[in-house]
Amino acid sequence: MAGGGGGTQTSGMGHVEGAHLEYCLPDGRVLFADVSFRVGEGSAVALVVANGAGKTTLLRLISGELKPHGGTVTVSGGLGVMPQFVGSIRDERTVRDLLVSVSQPRLRKAARAVGEAEHAVMTVDDEAAQMAQALSDWAEARGYEAETLWDMCTMAALGVPYERAAAGAHAQRRRAETTGA
């Protein structure tokens, strides 16, 4: 998620900061209280605690998906969040969806047009012109350059090229669309 959903944005070097965060479970129990941290741009960090201690909840607070019951989250620069189950049976989003979601608005718009054109080509035979225009817009938005960067990201994070990381769930979605499953 670019810019971190519910966080405050400031200028300067990118960072993520949590100050005196509190979060309570729906039954009122405190999951964590007075949690503070700062992660500077370019840092590699690990969050290692016992199961059930609130790792996923903390990341959901940072991304803006949840609001803390106390304290603040500040995000500057860009923030990309890969959900725990991206690409799984429990989550229809793909690695491509994630990468597009943290891209510049022009690229997100071009990606949406390509997706719509692909769907039109699969469902209506005479939509080739729409596809050609969508691919042209994708090129102008520097989508192919983005895919090169995404390839480096998926190789580093997943050990597989972008095409393979993006194709798995994409192929499943296409099969479901064409079969009506």
Image (cartoon, rainbow, N blue to C red):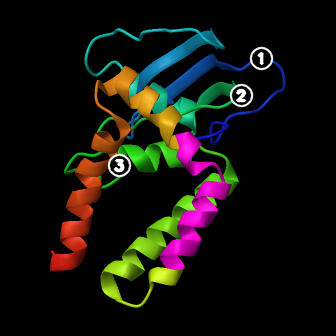
Magenta residue check for 134: yes
Label 2 or label 1, whichever comes before in sequence order: 1
**Earlier sequence position, callout 1 versus callout 3:** 1
In the image, 98 versus 127, the foreground residue is: 127
SS of the residue at dot 2?
Answer: loop
Q: Secondary structure at mark 3?
A: loop
Q: Which residue is outermost to the right?
A: 11
Q: Which mark is residue 94?
A: 3
Q: Are dots 2 and 3 in contact, CB under 8 Å?
A: no
**Quadrant position of the C terminus in the picture:** bottom left
| Circles 2 and 1: CB atoms closer than 8 Å | yes
Judged left or right of residue 97, residue 72 is right
Identify the residue at horizontal 33%, vertical 46% (top origin). Answer: 166
Q: Look at label 3 and name its amino acid.
A: Thr
Q: Which residues are magenta?
A: 130-146
Q: Position of residue 161 (x, y in %)?
A: 33, 33
Figure check: 167 above or below 126: above
Q: Quadrant of residue 128?
A: bottom left
At horizontal 66% and vertical 14% (from top left) the residue drawn is 41
- Of residues 11 and 97, which is closer to you in this image? 97
Determine which quarter of the picture holds residue 152: top left
- Neighbor class of circle 1 (other Cα within 10 Å; few <14, some 14-19, many 20+) is few
User: Few, some or many C-alpha atoms within 10 Å of disc 2 (few <14, some 14-19, many ≥20)?
Assistant: some
Expressed as whole percent of the image width and height from the top left, the position of residue 50 reads 27, 11
Label 1 sits on residue = 13
Indicate which label's residue lies in the foreground, 2 or 3: 3
Q: Does 88 sit left or right of 64 as displayed?
A: left
Question: How far is mark 1 from mark 3, CA to CA?
Answer: 29 Å
Q: Residues within 10 Å of mark 3 (few under 14, many from 20)?
A: many
Q: Which residue is mark 2?
A: 77
Could one spot residue 142 in this view of the protein? yes
